[in-house]
Image: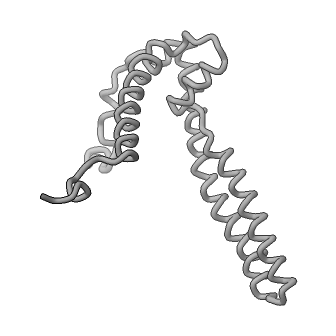
Amino acid sequence: MLPYYYYPSIGYWELILLLTAILSVIGGLVVYFTFMSRKKEGTFKNSFVKWLYDFLHFKVIVLDTISKVLYVVCAVFLTLFGVIFLFVGQGMVFILSAVVGNVLLRLAYELFMLFIKLVRNTSEIKNKLYEEAVENPALTAKTDHADSEKNIFSDDEKNT
């Protein structure tokens, strides 16, 4: 007969991980089907609950705030790193870290922020169009789209 440690068994941490996974799936499903229902969109009076509802529906974007803080922390780190090496006598490391590193960091951050601003602007345009459609329902009335479906580059129209 083999000793007890040869037999496969679930350990303490594995049991905690398994129970946490099961409870998180159950809790996530309960929250999704009760709190996050689209029917409850305008029913929340508490500002925190409304913010939480918008946050869980990704109407609130916090990535830009987090990225700003991360950018400042990285820029300060690169600058301090370069200054320390300047005092040690490594001037080239100072130039690479404090100057070139900060310029490259800024370019990467601005490229990232372009995507964030694109999302924000698109969302603002969508909201503005929705508000205009609600104010003036005639804008959303169905029209005959037979002319718009015609190919504007057909051979018949090119020859005329």
Q: Is residue 108 above or below residue 143?
A: below
> What x and y, as percent, mark residue 19?
36, 36
Residue 160 is left or right of residue 64, and the answer is: left
Q: Quadrant of residue 98?
A: bottom right
Residue depicted at x 75% and y 66%: 77
> What x and y, as percent, mark residue 114?
61, 52
The one of 30 and 106 positioned closer to us in this rendering: 30
The one of 121 and 32 positioned closer to us in this rendering: 32
Residue 22 is left or right of residue 64, and the answer is: left
Q: Is residue 54 above or below residue 95?
A: above
Question: Which quadrant, please, contains the N terminus?
Answer: bottom left
Residue 14 is left or right of residue 8, and the answer is: right
> What x and y, as percent, mark residue 17?
39, 43
Residue projecting furthest to the left: 1
Residue depicted at x 33% and y 30%: 147
Residue depicted at x 65% and y 46%: 64
Whether residue 25 appears in this view of the structure is: yes
Whether residue 160 appears in this view of the structure is: no
Residue projecting furthest to the right: 87
The one of 84 and 130 positioned closer to us in this rendering: 84
> What x and y, as percent, mark residue 31?
44, 22
Residue 90 is left or right of residue 115, and the answer is: right
Q: Is residue 147 above or below residue 10?
A: above
